[in-house]
Each structure stands twice: as structure tokens, then as C-alpha cells.
Amino acid sequence: MEPALARLALAHGTGEHAKGTVKDVSATRIVVETAQGDRTFNVTPRTKFVKRGAAVNSRDVLSGDRVVVHGVNVSGALEATDVRAADSVPSRHAK
Ligand SMILES: [Zn+2]
């Protein structure tokens, strides 16, 4: 694992994390409606999309899907690193 990825993994819990419902999604950004309000993340070619355990692309994640998005702050903008959509949110994210 390269150092940057190791740091990202260790940062989980203190990094950017949003759990909620997709309000809007495109090839360049995703808006998640969370209990704390809307969160907007930029989507980049590096953003990983996973739906029900399978790798997909941004077009397969739809408005209304329940998602967990992890991101990093890049020059003041949130950049999504991974977007995980599912029928039910993984239990480790329940709280
Ligand atoms: Zn998380």
C-alpha cells in the first residue's frame, strides 16, 4: 500500500464522511442529503463507485440511493474518494 493510501485509511473517522441519500449525481459531482444537511463532493476520475458490492460507474448511482461517501479536502473542495451505494447502509456506518 502506498503511503498516501495508508494515510487515507488511517484517517477514516476523522476525514470527510457522509451517509445519506443521493440528492443529485453527475460525472463531476455528487450531492448527498444527510441528517446534518446537504454535502457536495466533487467526482473525479479517481472516485470509486460501488453498488451492492460491485464496482460501477457514476451513472449507476441514482438519486434516492442510500450511500456512504468518503472524501478528502483538496484545496478547500471536497473530493469523493469512494461512493458506496446499497439497499441498506453497512452496519458499521449505522451510527
Ligand atoms: Zn465511513
Image (cartoon, rainbow, N blue to C red):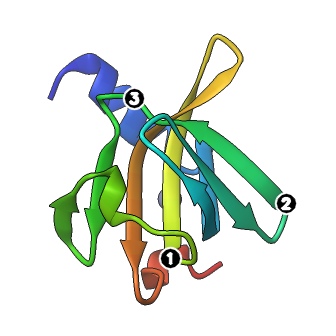
The answer to which image quadrant residue 87 occupies is bottom left
Q: Name the residue under label 2.
A: 37
Q: In which quarter of the image is the N terminus?
A: top left
State the image coordinates of residue 7 (x, y, percent, origin top left): 39, 28
Mark drawn on residue 44? 3
Q: Which of 57 and 3 is in front in this view?
A: 57
Mark drawn on residue 45? none
The residue located at (46%, 69%) in the rendering is 62
Mark 2 is surrounded, within 10 Å at the Cα level, by few (under 14), some (14 to 19) or many (20 or more) other residues, namely few
Distance from disc 2 to disc 3, alpha carbons, whole Å, reads 22 Å
Mark 3 is surrounded, within 10 Å at the Cα level, by few (under 14), some (14 to 19) or many (20 or more) other residues, namely few
State the image coordinates of residue 22 (x, y, percent, origin top left): 59, 66
Q: Which of 91 and 77 is in front in this view?
A: 77
The first of marks 2 and 3 along the sequence is 2
The first of marks 1 and 3 along the sequence is 3
At numbered mark 3, what does the secondary structure look like: helix, strand or loop?
Answer: loop
Q: In which quarter of the image is the C terminus?
A: bottom right
Mark 1 is surrounded, within 10 Å at the Cα level, by few (under 14), some (14 to 19) or many (20 or more) other residues, namely many
Distance from disc 2 to disc 1, alpha carbons, whole Å, reads 16 Å
Residues at marks 1 and 3 touching, judged by CB atoms closer than 8 Å: no
State the image coordinates of residue 36 (x, y, percent, origin top left): 85, 63
Q: Which of 87 and 63 is in front in this view?
A: 63
Q: What residue type is labelled 2?
A: Gly
The answer to which image quadrant residue 52 occupies is bottom left
The tally of labels here is 3
Residues at marks 2 and 3 touching, judged by CB atoms closer than 8 Å: no
Answer left or right for 1 relative to 13: left
Q: Mark 1 points at which residue?
A: 65
